[in-house]
Amino acid sequence: MPTITTTVTSAAASGVVTTQTTTEATPAATPEAASSRAVELTKAILGAWAADGGVTLARDVAKYYAPDAVADWGSTAINLPQFKKYVGHAGITEWLEEITATADVHQFDCTYSAGSGDACYVHVNWNFTVKATGKTFKGTDIIYYTFNSDGMATGMTMFWTNPLGVEAAYTSDGDPVAAAVAILDSWEAGTLAKDVPQLFAEDAVADWGSDAINLPQYAKYTGHASIVEWLGKIDEDLEFTKFDRTHSEAKGNGCYIHIDWTVTVKSTGKSVSSTDIIYYTFNSDGKATGITMYWTNPGALEAAYSA
């Protein structure tokens, strides 16, 4: 679990944070007593979060946040969909669960400063690892909390000093060609049906020729179970006597597989040779999101299925 090291000060604090897209100024702070109510309230929120990685705080959002509270996790600074504004109890619960699901926080050292009115600055020295990429971000950033007269948090704004570093930590360095080769190597080894959950996104779509070939099995297959079904139909229908392939990277985290191949349709004993293209796309986790087959001679394949 993350830990919090607390040093409470009463010094004034102000600053400007420059991002790659905008320049944001933190609201001016004024000297106040170290025991400022806003400081104590903020310490309570972050203490609840640190206790078990946010699980308890997500459950007890209504205890700490006003019903219309807004948590801005970086909506104008970071170009990632989860770094947005989260509004209300449901939104803030979503935000806390997002942090827990995507990042492991290893260090979270804080210095608190009282702001003007019921507000508090949290100066954080921290690092976390993004679970999906294994990359670690280290930063010294500012969290700004505001509270209403009832002591409920009304706003949480994150001021990032290195937003590009955050984006880099969340971005996979995946190689789409290597990922496509891994899928085909698994298929040639006879293990792809078993390896589908590791190599394909849950909502992946394999289009085996839905717009090109007038045979029912040459359809779109969506999701893990359906892709396993598709692989079974290939094995049931076809015997491959040649499958030569070359690979090239494509835009959109994709890969083209250029194949020179010969198959025999088991039900008819007829063979067909062709040079075709398989187009793969991958997500940031390196899992296949789409496979599309581009046939150069669909009529020949349909004929091979005819007795």
Image (cartoon, rainbow, N blue to C red):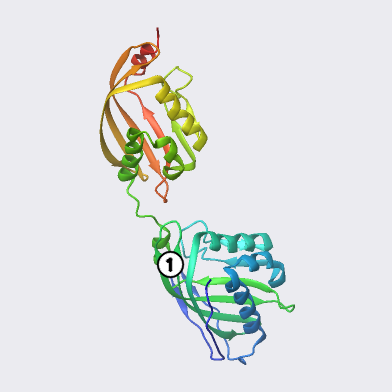
Which residue is at the front of the view, 279 or 202? 202
Q: Residue furthest right?
A: 150
Residue 117, can we see it?
A: no
Q: Amino acid at mark 1?
A: Pro
| Res 273 quadrant in image | top left
Q: Residues within 10 Å of mark 1 (few under 14, many from 20)?
A: many
Q: Position of residue 119 (x, y in %)?
A: 62, 81
Q: Residue furthest top?
A: 307
Residue 255, position as x, y percentages in the image = 32, 40
Which quarter shows the C terminus?
top left
The answer to whether residue 288 is left or right of residue 273 is right
Q: Nearer the viewer, residue 197 or 260?
A: 197
Residue 296: where, in percent of width, then height? 32, 22
For residue 160, side relative to residue 298 (left or right): right
Identify the residue at horizontal 33%, vertical 14% (top origin): 300
Question: Which residue is located at x 61 percent, y 62 percent?
Answer: 86
Badge 1 is on which residue?
Answer: 163
Is residue 48 something one can see in this rendering? yes
